[in-house]
Amino acid sequence: MTTAYLAAWNAKDADAAAALMSDDVEYLDVTVGEAQKGRDAARDNVIKVFFAAVPDLKWEMKGEPIVAEDGIAFEWTFSGTNTGAWGPETPATGKTFSFDGVTFIRVKDGKIAYQGDYYDGYGFQKQLGWIE
């Protein structure tokens, strides 16, 4: 599942990534603070936002994932160039970035039921020039 999920992200295929999620998935990006609930919300408010803001994004797993019957955890590096707006109040900066993080996934009935992404939001924002 992890390989297919990262492949969908790297192919910029939001529908393929979302298809691996349960209907009632909960997706938490720790820097946002509030989880997106439901497959459509995760696809539209997280995945598509990243694709629009970073069309050349690259999400690479570092090492081997830790896999259990109902969960997966893995370290990663996320990189790209911010050429699109993140939202109305966060226009594109044109800056490149690269940051590391970890993802925790809970699996239920073969689908992603929960995803939590944890990373250095401060360092990410510094690279984009949003803060000094």
Image (cartoon, rainbow, N blue to C red):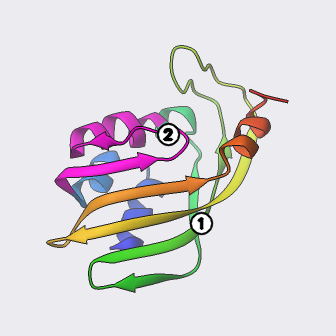
Q: What element carries label 2?
A: helix
**What is the magenta range?**
22-49
Q: Quadrant of residue 64?
A: bottom right
Q: Mark 2 or mark 1: name the one nearer the start of the chain.
A: 2
Magenta-colored stretch includes residue 14? no
In the image, is residue 12 above or below residue 60?
Answer: above
Image location of residue 2, percent across then percent down: 39, 72
Which residue ends up furthest to the top in the rendered image?
Answer: 88
The N terminus sits in image quarter = bottom left
In the image, is residue 90 above or below residue 8?
Answer: above
Q: How far apart are marks 2 and 1 (CA)?
A: 16 Å
Q: Mark 2 points at which residue?
A: 50
Q: Which amino acid does label 2 sit on?
A: Phe
Q: Mark 1 points at which residue?
A: 76
Q: Quadrant of residue 9?
A: bottom left
The residue at 58%/27% (across/down) is 84
Image location of residue 20, percent across then percent down: 25, 61
Q: Residues within 10 Å of mark 1 (few under 14, many from 20)?
A: some
The residue at 46%/73% (across/down) is 73
In the image, is residue 122 above or below residue 18?
Answer: above
Magenta-colored stretch includes residue 31? yes
Mark toward the viewer: 2 or 1: 1
Q: Which amino acid does label 1 sit on?
A: Trp
